[in-house]
Image (cartoon, rainbow, N blue to C red):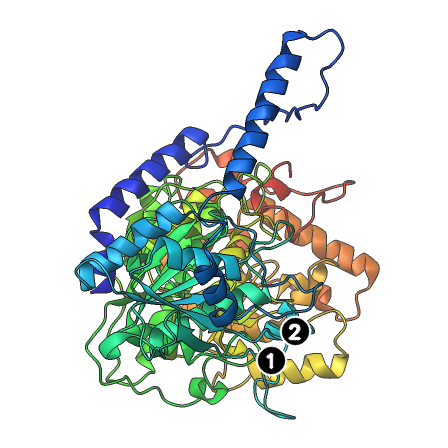
């Protein structure tokens, strides 16, 4: 299995160990201590007053040496070829045509020819006894094409031409926030990205097949370098050449030249397919032909669904293919916040799977738990059906202490589950309503849209691999996340993601701009539908287990009422009630949370909120049960009823962790 091979690649495993040790020393794993970066002291062209005058002579000598090197370079064979070479270059190598101000496809990476030669030796040594490889050169300029033929004269190098995408095509066109998934008005379409064509090689011969497709990629210095239309277009074009022009039905090697900080698309050119580790700015892959063709059959972006909307509504038929190891997974880095949610999520998975096709294979449920999760809670997770695996929590270096996103980089450990070929990740605040089996047929990373061009990481399909985990860990310090959390980080790494229908991860969220009629229609059509139409409902705002069961407590908070839905709230409690009584004991309310709920209801009453939920009498039996007494036997003082008097609840309910929000109540 690919996952098995990936997990047992010795070199990559050792490099991952070194990465983890480095992260641990830097404090990203387990704990973190901030250190101020040393200030950058720019070099001055002039000697500052009072400095050593000998520096002037040193600088003069350096200037002379630089001038001499420049003159030598101008007269080198690499620059001045004989007339025959000059004629060949001008006649046979077409110039890349583009408008003078169109620099989208231009790469300023300096080609490291010794590293290119080293990579080509790996290809030639494996397949051609030392030479004769046929190469397609994509996005190399004229001088680089000529240099390739000079440095590697035994290769047959042909130029791959690629018409550029229209300058009006933006990332937002490829990844729109909303599409007509159900095709109620029109079928969604994607912008056109032209396909590559190949010229004759240096000897004027037509080339039908290639051993290597070499592509040079741009790497923007500002903004998000991974969300670049030209960069995506070039990589898809290289992949298409490799998939369609390889020898004997196999895929050609793909050689990528890019600035080292701008790595290739990891779910198109998979690290498990690397022929050798990255060498400077050079990557060399031998992709799996079938996997590459499946990837290229997907829409170019989220402008179209990667699977039909109807696929979620129809009974799923398992494909007649060799069985794969597949699993559901969740992550727990706070028992106080999410243990109850994980228990009910497991119950909902089992209930939904029982309603599916009898031929569906049974899939494992794996819970990754960090060192803060107690033995008592681990036992409860196992009783609920989770296979518990211990991990070290990973700190987000940009998160504030006690923030909701402080430890959610722990999600990267999903890629350590290499005994599985495919994993469907579920946040612990999800309720599964229908079988999730169709998602296991989707590639990495498949997810639903969130907002803007982004996907929501609460439900996503991943393909575990140790080298992907290493990639994620390696860039923790240098990739910015739009929301400071794992979701923003993963959107930067996996910018080429595949859109699932929104019903695969239905957000219990109605935008503030929606009309009352739209809100009511959404509730009736999705959240109140019988039988359920959404595969999973994602709870945003105050979670059901933090509310009294009588109604969705988000109604009582001005910040959170946009997330309120009594229909979704009631469905969650039905799954809760199906659990054994012993597990329900992990969903009791802390006395501080009860005080917060009473405070919110009083504030809603004072504001006379029109929905009137604050009028509903509380009958939830948990209001009279002490969570501490039922748990680990702490002092009875913890069970004393608390009240919030003459003070305001501080903190943003959406971005502040529950523990910090109620710490002083």
What whole-number distance in Å separates the C-alpha atoms at marks 1 and 2? 7 Å
Which residue lies most toward the front here? 83
Image height check: is 13 above or below 205?
A: above
Count of marks overlaid on the render: 2
Residue in front for this viewpoint, 51 or 315: 51
* Dot placed on the residue nearer the N-terminal end, 1 or 2: 2
Which class describes the residues within 10 Å of circle 1: few (<14), some (14-19), or many (20+)?
Answer: some
Residue at 57% across, 88% down: 182
Drawn side of residue 351 relative to residue 323, left or right: right
Which class describes the residues within 10 Å of circle 2: few (<14), some (14-19), or many (20+)?
Answer: some
SS class of the residue under badge 1? loop
Residue 607: % across, % down: 83, 60
Residue in front for this viewpoint, 651 or 608: 651
Query: Label 2 near label 1: C-beta < 8 Å?
Result: yes
Q: Quadrant of residue 390?
A: top left
SS class of the residue under badge 2? loop
- Mark 1 = which residue? 191
- Mark 2 = which residue? 169
Residue at 26% across, 54% down: 121
Drawn side of residue 105 relative to residue 124, left or right: right
Q: Mark on residue 451?
A: none
Q: Quadrant of residue 294?
A: bottom left
Image height check: is 469 above or below 28?
A: below
Report the quarter where the N terminus lies.
bottom left
Report the quarter where the C terminus lies.
top right
Residue 342: % across, % down: 41, 58
Residue at 36% across, 46% down: 114
Which residue lies most toward the left here? 129
Residue 490: % across, % down: 50, 56
Residue 269 seen from this side = yes
Image height check: is 262 above or below 241?
A: above
Residue at 51% across, 40% down: 73
């Amino acid at each position: 299995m690919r996952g098995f091979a990936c997990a047992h690649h010795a070199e990559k495993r050792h490099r991952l160990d070194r990465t983890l040790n480095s992260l641990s020393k830097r404090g990203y794993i387990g704990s973190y201590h901030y250190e101020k970066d040393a200030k950058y002291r720019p070099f001055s062209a002039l000697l500052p007053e009072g400095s050593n005058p000998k520096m002037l002579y040193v600088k003069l000598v350096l200037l002379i040496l630089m001038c001499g090197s420049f003159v030598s370079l101008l007269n080198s064979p690499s620059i001045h070829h004989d007339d025959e070479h000059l004629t060949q270059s001008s006649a046979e190598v077409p110039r890349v045509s583009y408008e003078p101000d169109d620099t989208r496809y231009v790469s300023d990476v300096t080609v490291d020819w010794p590293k290119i030669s080293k990579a080509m030796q790996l290809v030639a040594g494996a397949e051609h006894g030392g030479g004769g490889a046929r190469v397609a050169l994509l996005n190399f300029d004229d001088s680089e094409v000529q240099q390739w033929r000079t440095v590697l004269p035994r290769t047959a190098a042909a130029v791959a031409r690629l018409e550029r995408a229209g300058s009006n095509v933006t990332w937002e066109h490829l990844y729109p926030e909303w599409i007509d998934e159900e095709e109620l008005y029109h079928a969604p379409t994607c912008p056109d990205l032209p396909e590559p064509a190949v010229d004759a090689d240096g000897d004027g011969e037509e080339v039908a097949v290639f051993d290597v497709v070499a592509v040079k990629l741009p790497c923007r210095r500002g903004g998000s370098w991974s969300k670049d239309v030209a960069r995506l277009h070039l990589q898809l074009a290289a992949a298409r050449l490799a998939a369609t022009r390889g020898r004997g039905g196999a895929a050609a090697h793909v050689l990528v030249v890019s600035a080292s900080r701008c790595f290739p698309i990891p779910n198109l050119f998979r690290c498990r397919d690397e022929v050798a580790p990255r060498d400077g700015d050079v990557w060399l892959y031998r992709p799996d032909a079938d996997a590459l063709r499946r990837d290229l059959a997907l829409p170019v972006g989220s402008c179209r669904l990667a699977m039909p909307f109807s696929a979620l509504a129809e009974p799923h038929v398992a494909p007649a293919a060799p069985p794969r190891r597949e699993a559901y997974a969740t992550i727990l880095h706070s028992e106080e916040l999410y243990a109850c949610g994980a228990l009910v999520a497991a119950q909902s998975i089992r209930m939904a799977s029982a309603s599916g096709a009898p031929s569906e294979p049974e899939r494992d449920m794996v819970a990754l738990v960090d060192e803060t999760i107690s033995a008592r809670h681990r036992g409860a997770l196992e009783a609920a059906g989770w296979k518990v695996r211990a991990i070290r929590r990973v700190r987000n270096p940009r998160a504030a202490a006690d923030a909701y996103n402080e430890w959610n980089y722990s999600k990267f450990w999903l890629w350590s589950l290499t005994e599985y070929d495919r994993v469907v990740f579920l946040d612990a605040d999800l309720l599964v309503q229908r079988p999730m089996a169709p998602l296991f047929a989707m590639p990495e990373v498949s997810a639903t849209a969130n907002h803007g061009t982004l996907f929501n990481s609460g439900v996503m399909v991943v393909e575990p691999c140790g080298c992907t985990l290493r990639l994620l860990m390696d860039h923790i310090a240098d990739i910015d996340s739009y929301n400071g959390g794992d979701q923003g980080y993963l959107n930067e790494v996996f910018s080429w993601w595949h859109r699932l229908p929104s019903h695969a991860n239905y957000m219990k969220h109605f935008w503030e701009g929606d009309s009352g009629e739209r809100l009511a229609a959404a509730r009736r059509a999705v959240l109140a539908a019988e039988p359920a139409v959404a595969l999973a409902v994602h709870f945003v705002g105050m979670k059901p287990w933090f509310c009294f069961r009588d109604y969705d407590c988000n109604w009582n908070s001005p910040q959170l009422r946009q997330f309120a839905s009594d229909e979704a709230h009631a469905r969650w409690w039905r799954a809760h009630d199906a659990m054994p009584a012993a597990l329900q004991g992990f969903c009791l309310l802390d006395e501080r949370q009860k005080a917060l709920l009473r405070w919110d209801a009083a504030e809603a009453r004072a504001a006379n909120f029109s929905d009137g939920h604050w009028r509903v009498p509380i009958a939830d039996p948990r209001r009279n049960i002490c969570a501490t007494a039922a748990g680990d036997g702490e002092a009875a003082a913890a069970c004393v009823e608390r009240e919030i008097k003459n003070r305001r609840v501080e903190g943003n309910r959406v971005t502040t962790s529950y523990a910090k929000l109620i710490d002083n109540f």
